[in-house]
Amino acid sequence: MDKKDVKRRRMWQYFIEATAAIIEEEGYDHITIRKIADKAGYNSATIYNYFSELSHLTFFASMRFLKPYTSAFINTIEDNKSIIEQYLNGWECFCEFSYQNPRLFHTIFLMNIREEPKDLFKQYYDLYEADIVEFPNSLKPALYERNVAIRGESLLKAAADKGEIPQSKVKTISTMTTLIWQGMLTSILNRQTSLTSNEAKQETMISIRNVVYHAHLFETIT
């Protein structure tokens, strides 16, 4: 790594950590370029030498808070369970963390970001490699995928290979379960439901299990 790359990585970390501090101390609605620059000890113009949009910085800073979820997710993947059970446990873990912090998960997985999202995930994990050291190699490719439906397809395809679900229903299940989660997350974020995060998780999981166990009844999505 040459000196230019070392400097770029260092500057990225300065601004990402400054943005993360603002999120933690003041919340998303108070993020501004000027505040980030002041906290990092640089002027606003310097930020644009490294980040083309504020949304990218907000995304990277949000990723700093995702580690508790990824660590918990690993613990849900147990070898003595069927793959479809691992998939369902993974969804339950995802719902638990996302409903407790809907703004964080919306920012990472749903917020409009102009740059190719997969590139942002790769850039982040190249910078913070320690965040994925304990993650199983077989599932690491999913970490670079922002689309929640596609992230879950690796387990569904493995389940189909073992005959646990029909091969033809992989996309149907991944699409429908993602839409169920997205709908609930949006309702929580917009305060359109009185459910607690735990109640929302339980309700979502009932719907997700119904989709998984009765996928043969649904029209196939191709």
Image (tube, grey):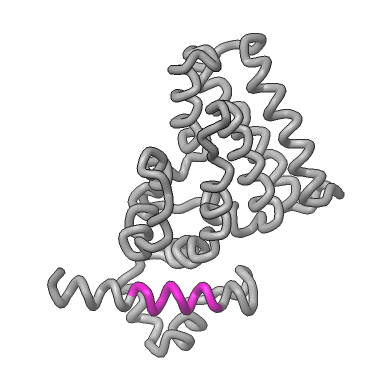
Which region of the structure is painted magenta? Answer: 12-21
Residue in view at x 68 percent, y 29 percent: 208
Task: Specify whether 135 is left or right of 28.
Answer: left
Which residue is nearer to you in this view: 31 or 6?
Answer: 6
Residue in view at x 49 percent, y 61 percent: 63
Residue in view at x 47 percent, y 88 percent: 38
Q: Does residue 214 lie above or below 87 as drawn?
A: above
Task: Specify whether 120 is left or right of 65.
Answer: left
Residue 19 is a magenta residue: yes
- Residue 112, given in percent of the width and then of the height, sits at 50, 51
Q: In which quarter of the image is residue 216?
A: top right
- The chief SS type of the magenta part is helix
Q: Does residue 53 lie above or below 136 as drawn?
A: below
Residue in view at x 48 percent, y 30 percent: 155
Task: Specify whether 116 is left or right of 171.
Answer: left
Which residue reaches farthest left?
Answer: 2
Counting the numbered discs, the total is 0
Question: Which quadrant of the figure contains the N terminus?
Answer: bottom left
Which residue reaches farthest right?
Answer: 194
- Residue 42, given in percent of the width and then of the height, sits at 38, 87
Which residue reaches farthest front?
Answer: 80
- Residue 125, given in percent of the width and then of the height, sits at 36, 58
Residue 206 is a magenta residue: no
- Residue 213, given in percent of the width and then of the height, sits at 66, 18
